[in-house]
Amino acid sequence: MTSRLTIAIQKSGRLSKESLALLKACGVKFSINDARLIAHSTSHNIDLLRVRDDDIPGLVMDGVVDLGLVGENVLEEARLEREATAMNANFVALRSLEFGHCRLSLAVPKEAQERGLAQLNGARIATTYPRLLQRYLQQQQIAARSVVLTGSVEVAPRAGLADAVCDLVSTGATLEANGLVETDVVFRSQAQLIQTAELSDPNKLALINQLLPRVDGVQLAKESKYIMLHAPKPRIDEVIALLPGAETPTLLPLSHTDQQVAVHMVSTETLFWETMEDLKALGCSSILVLPIEKMMG
Ligand code: ATP
Ligand code: MG
């Protein structure tokens, strides 16, 4: 029997939807039963383990699963924790996944915002990430105590449990709603694809080698646009100069005229309205910007 590659993803939370969408875009099909921990792929020898995100680094480091999709904040905290307690903290970072962006930031009550970082000397700081926090405080030569909370960190100052917080932020709306002001970024994070350090099964390695170019293809496609337009022949150089990243556009004749050519290109930059207006002013027409679903070099 061939071995099955196991991948741990967050069961339900901020990373779940995009983790599943990435696998799906890579052609890995699942039928998810919400009540089940494990989902078997119907297209590949892959099993999906759906767990709390906090458990993913340990599962990968202990070799219980082969791959994991997890936020760098959770990953780095787990790594520091395991290093400090002489546990195995090895893993292989395969790809940054360009989703789950957030930052771990220090925030203080609005009325204390003017006093700067030094006010945190001797303070109590509520956080879910004591290791990341202490590493930062050490770098800044600040001695503060962490109050470890796994949830509701942002209400700790009002509840009298802490003087400041070190919490995840993406827009800052939650901090603001709790009368807190972000003062320092401690750690920037996005989702990562990680692999267990000891992996020798040739079937699993072959599958990973098939998946990685697909992950890259999905990401590249997400960042890219297909641009098509009709351009006046005499001004073609000016048109190409306006197009972002257009080293090698494809030029095609048009059947109804020899005054114009069709220009097709893939761009990793988006075409702004301003550029489209400039193209129009040069005499271009039928300007289309299309999303790309898949790409392979
Ligand atoms: P679980 O039940 O799996 O432990 P959780 O409540 O710990 O879930 P979520 O709030 O779903 O976790 O966040 C999961 C991850 O999403 C975070 O660890 C972080 O990497 C990322 N993330 C992105 N934006 C944010 C944000 N604004 N706040 C919190 N986490 C964010
Ligand atoms: Mg969690």
Image (cartoon, rainbow, N blue to C red):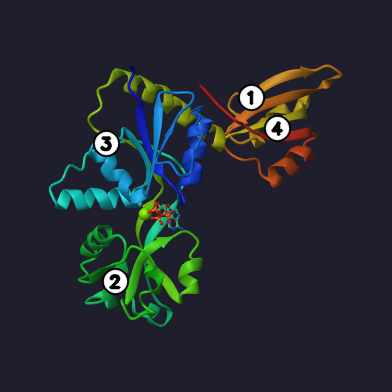
Residue 168: name its quadrant: bottom left
Q: Earlier in the sequence, mark 1 or mark 2?
A: 2
| Mark 4 to mark 2 CA distance (whole Å) | 56 Å
Local packing at callout 3 (Cα closer than 10 Å; few below 14, some 14-19, many 20+) is some
Residue 122 spot, x, y in % from top left: 22, 77
Name the residue beneath numbered marker 2: 125
- The answer to whether marks 1 and 2 mark residues whose Cβ atoms lie closer than 8 Å is no
Residue 66: name its quadrant: top left
Q: From what the image shows, is residue 94 above or below residue 149?
A: above
Q: Earlier in the sequence, mark 4 or mark 2?
A: 2
Local packing at callout 2 (Cα closer than 10 Å; few below 14, some 14-19, many 20+) is many
| Mark 1 to mark 2 CA distance (whole Å) | 55 Å
| Mark 4: secondary structure | helix
4 or 2: mark nearer the eye: 2
Q: How many marks?
A: 4
Compare residues 156 and 272 and report the one nearer the observer.
156
